[in-house]
Image (cartoon, rainbow, N blue to C red):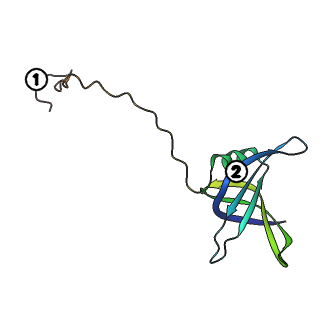
């Protein structure tokens, strides 16, 4: 088998499926721009870690996949076409999704702030230095 590295954007949300043997696998379709050509790649993932990474992504997200290349031909409108598939071992999101931030409680602003006071006031004055 030939190894391939594909960079592109996801077209539609990736899906998790179950094989006839009862094992999970994941599929996606990638648009990969190559000069003026826009090839479409089918992505198949059998690794749970790579499948989890794939499911985190959505339509339009950029990614890179690496794995085995499978090329098939078919006839459409009298012309021979190619179907490109990558059986991916590795999935890498090219832009990480934003992290969820915890909301910090807002301080009570009803009373004015107290003046700076240092507990180690050796000189007995209000000077902070």
Query: Residue at horizontal 31%, vertical 26%?
Result: 107
Other residues around mark 1 within 10 Å, as few (<14) / some (14–19) / many (≥20): few
Instruction: Give the mark, 1 or 2, whose residue is nearer the N terminus.
Output: 2
Instruction: Name the one closer to the observer, 121 or 77.
Output: 77
Horizontal and vertical percent position of residue 27: 75, 52
Instruction: Name the one closer to the observer, 126 or 124.
Output: 126
Which mark identifies residue 19? Answer: none
Residue 18 picture quarter: top right
Which mark identifies residue 123? Answer: 1
Horizontal and vertical percent position of residue 100: 50, 39
The quadrant of the rendering that contains the C terminus is top left
In the rendered structure, the answer to whether residue 118 lies left or right of residue 96 reads: left
Residue beneath label 2, please?
A: 14
In the rendered structure, the answer to whether residue 124 lies left or right of residue 5 reads: left
Residue 29 picture quarter: bottom right
The quadrant of the rendering that contains the N terminus is bottom right
3D distance between C-alphas at marks 1 and 2? 68 Å
Other residues around mark 2 within 10 Å, as few (<14) / some (14–19) / many (≥20): many
Query: Residue at horizontal 82%, vertical 76%?
Result: 77
Horizontal and vertical percent position of residue 88: 75, 56
Q: Kindly report which numbered mark, 1 or 2, lies closer to the viewer in this rendering.
A: 2
Mark 1 touches mark 2? (CB < 8 Å): no
In the rendered structure, the answer to whether residue 8 lies left or right of residue 73 reads: left
Q: In this view, does 108 lie above or below 24?
A: above
In the rendered structure, the answer to whether residue 9 lies left or right of residue 115 reads: right
- Residue extending farthest to the front is 77
Query: Residue at horizontal 90%, vertical 45%?
Result: 20
Horizontal and vertical percent position of residue 3: 77, 65
């Amino acid at each position: 088998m030939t190894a391939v590295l594909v960079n592109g954007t996801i077209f539609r949300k990736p899906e998790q499926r179950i094989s006839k043997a009862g094992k999970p696998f994941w599929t996606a379709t990638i648009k990969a721009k190559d000069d003026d050509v826009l090839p479409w790649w089918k992505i198949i993932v059998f690794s749970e870690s790579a499948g989890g990474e794939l499911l985190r992504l959505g339509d339009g997200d950029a990614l890179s996949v690496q794995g085995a290349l499978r090329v098939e031909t078919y006839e459409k409108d009298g012309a021979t076409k190619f179907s490109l598939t990558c059986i991916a071992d590795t999935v890498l999101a090219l832009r990480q999704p934003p992290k969820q931030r915890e909301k910090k409680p807002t301080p009570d602003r009803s009373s004015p702030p107290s003046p700076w006071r240092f507990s180690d006031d050796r000189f007995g004055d209000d000077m902070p230095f």
